[in-house]
Amino acid sequence: MQTTPWSRSLALAAALALGASGSHAASHREAPAMTLDPAADISDVYAFVSYDAANLARSPELRKVTLVMNVVPGQEPSAGPNYFGFGDDVLYRLHVDNDRDGVAEDVVYEIAFQTETTNPDQFLATLGGGPLPPVSALEGPGSEGLARTQRYTVTERRGCDTKRKGLKCDADVTLFGGTLLPSVPSNIGPRTMPDYESLAAQGIFEDGATGIRVFAGQRAETFAIDLGAVFDTINLRVEAATPIESVRPPLPVMTAAEDADDFQHPYGVNAFSGFNVNTIAIEVPITRLTANQAPATSETGVLGVYASTSRRMITTISGAPVVDEGKPLVQTRRAFRQVSRMGNPLVNELIIPIGRKDFWNSSEPEDEAQFLGAFRSLAVASALEAVSGVPVPPTPREDVVQLLLKYPGQDPDPSVGPFAELLRLDVTVPPTPPSDIKRLTILAHDAAGNPTPDPAGFPNGRRPNDDVTDLVVRVAGGPNFIANFVGDGVGVAEAGITPVFPFLPTPFDGRNRRHVDPGE
């Protein structure tokens, strides 16, 4: 394999592991129970200082942070007539740790949905034999074509305790005056929704009392990965990679120029091309998230974030032989219990063994010490070495523990906690303008291989278009992988970078969707 100076490679590895707060987020079908429960399946978590024009223009003490949770992954846009929604029986939460103790319950945003069937006799775009007008509004005139409307509430909770029964908190603030906000429906197609972007813009709401903005609805998938190659026992597409001195390398490598081009797929295939996802995005003033609710400093500016979904303990299903059309077929009761969580990406897929995946999802991030063995053995790195013959760093992988489970500056002693699996964001780092965002963030470089780092992205939180796949593969593989630009050969997804809230693109519509397949 080609080489670059080891000193540079080791420096980059150390910077990625220790120099910025560390995590990544990408999870699809990561645990057995979640494969059967898409409404509660968290596919991605993002946390970043907003990079729209308004926030770029604000002074640091007035800036805002965006937190995003994606669920219901892998949505085929044409999958009607019942399209995609959130779960009325699922409680969605975004959690923040602002005092570095690893317990991310200092501030919690709780989102709960309820669905109303407004036109029970509707068939496609007709009602009572007559045509319905195109959908141009989420509610009221112009929304007649929507057979069902899904609405939600947002609650800000502070000083919470997960160890007590349920989530008990010191203070709750019901945002938007408790108003039920309509979510944005799936993008059915141009005849049904001729101006979807305007329709989706109606789904952005701002709370005048707090300055918080929120959006819930369908978006295009921005996570880009050659998923089939990764999960075929790390069978990355070597046959299409750049030859080194006319010899096919044991791992797919890119030239510096190929790796520096964020918007090309030099040899990989994006498995999520043309697919959509459901997004909950909340933009919050930084001063509502810091421990003292004051402008962030070096002491208060690093936040830990994760998302969770919960279901009630008991579900009762009605059905034959006794059926009452006037009652719901599914009823739930008792307290909510967590069924899925995510902070860092690919942790449950690539680090936690299959027999513990569901247990991991139901546990709290501050209890991560019970999974330390999996982080230190890092089986995915062993798999990379086994299939390629290229050496990876020896175990135990304390660099991975430091990256994923500790805050910057926290005691590096492997016996000293707390260990908490959280996505960590330093909000004192200014946002990068959309035109300058680099998918490789701290490992970004130009076509000649000269470093051009972008410190506002992963591992300093994560933005929607950060290439966590390549970054994770390189961290797991170590200096050889970093030096040779090893990755899955997939860059930024085809929809590109969205410069405005909620920072994920307009979803693909059902009639005109297209998935770019291998060889195309």
Image (cartoon, rainbow, N blue to C red):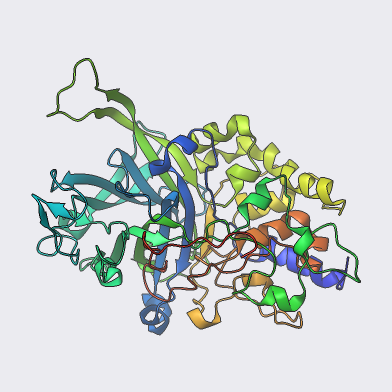
Image quarter where the N terminus lies is bottom right
> What is the x, y in percent for residue 246?
90, 70
> What is the x, y in percent for residue 49?
45, 70
Image quarter where the C terminus lies is bottom right
Q: Is residue 205 visible?
A: yes
Q: Is residue 288 visible?
A: no
Residue toward you, 379 or 37: 37
**Residue 253 higher or lower than 97, as above or below:** below
**Which residue is depicted at the point 69% across and 45% down?**
232
Total residue callouts:
0
> What is the x, y in percent for residue 349?
60, 43
> What is the x, y in percent for residue 171?
27, 48
Position of 502 with respect to 272 (left or right) is left
**Residue 106 higher or lower than 441, as above or below:** above
Residue toward you, 516 or 158: 516
Q: In this view, which residue lies farthest toward the top? A: 321
**Residue 34 higher or lower than 445, as above or below:** above
Q: Quadrant of residue 190?
A: bottom left
**Residue 273 higher or lower than 414, as above or below:** below
Residue toward you, 483 or 321: 321
Position of 373 with respect to 386 (left or right) is left
